[in-house]
Amino acid sequence: LPIVVALTGLACFGVMDGFMKAAAIALGAYAAMFWRNLVGTCVMLPIWLMRGNKDGSRSLPGRAAMRLHLMRSGVSGVMAVLFFYGLARTPVAEAMALSFVAPLLALYLAAVTLGEELSRRAVAGSVLALSGVGVIAAGKFGGQYNAESVHGLIAILVSAVLYAWNLVLQRRQSQL
């Protein structure tokens, strides 16, 4: 069951990326994000209002948690716009492959900012995976390329760094 759930999640993200690529090409990345967030809010707000907090209350989070929520919202917003900007300028498979650098970067960010320990196997695996991303990026810069696809590549890589930061912020939230 966990494998089926994980594969379903990956399929949903893949379909969403396809829709967002089309929307970003048609409307621009910022407008596509606006409509995506509006639909998401309309779907999730009633559920959030019905559920409340863990204790059943409707109170807002404390100051420290709210600060993290706001910081994470800002990081997520910029991250998503950059990703969909890049997605509109690169093939979906390439964009997805490049974005997989984010969890690898999060590994190191968590070590630096949260004091989490890194195992040798994790470091070796991340270096190997980062080299794969390097091969993809080298394909864009070597030989013929157009400026738009390079801009897309850079946007996706910056988005991946922000996604890594977002993952660390999410971990910090869970510790609160």
Image (spheres, rainbow, N blue to C red):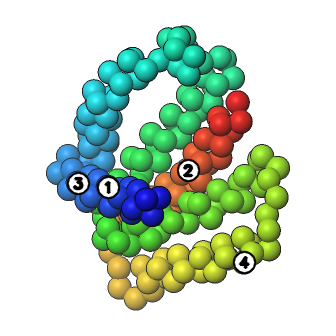
Q: Are marks 3 and 2 in contact (CB under 8 Å)?
A: no
Where, quadrant-wise, is the C terminus in this rendering? top right
The residue nearer to you, when weighing 45 against 86, is: 45
Q: Position of residue 135 (x, y in %)?
A: 51, 83
Q: Earlier in the sequence, mark 3 or mark 4?
A: 3
- Per the rendering, the mark at residue 12 is 1
Q: CA distance from mark 1 to mark 4?
A: 30 Å
Where, quadrant-wise, is the N terminus in this rendering? bottom left
Residue mark closest to the camera, 1 vs 4:
1
Residue mark closest to the camera, 2 vs 4:
4
Q: Amino acid at mark 4?
A: Ala
Query: Which residue lies under the disc numbered 4?
Result: 124
Residue lying farthest to the front in this orientation: 1
Few, some or many C-alpha atoms within 10 Å of disc 1 (few <14, some 14-19, many ≥20)?
Answer: few
Q: Position of residue 75 (x, y in %)?
A: 53, 40
Q: Position of residue 20 (x, y in %)?
A: 27, 52
Q: Amino acid at mark 1?
A: Cys
Residue 154 showing in the rendered view:
no
Query: Which residue lies under the disc numbered 2?
Result: 162
**x 55%, y 50%: residue:** 162
Whether residue 171 sits left or right of residue 31 in the image: it is right
Q: CA distance from mark 3 to mark 4?
A: 35 Å
Identify the secondary structure beneath mark 1: helix
Few, some or many C-alpha atoms within 10 Å of disc 3 (few <14, some 14-19, many ≥20)?
Answer: few
Residue lying farthest to the left in this orientation: 26
Whether residue 54 sits left or right of residue 143 in the image: it is right
Q: CA distance from mark 3 to mark 2?
A: 22 Å
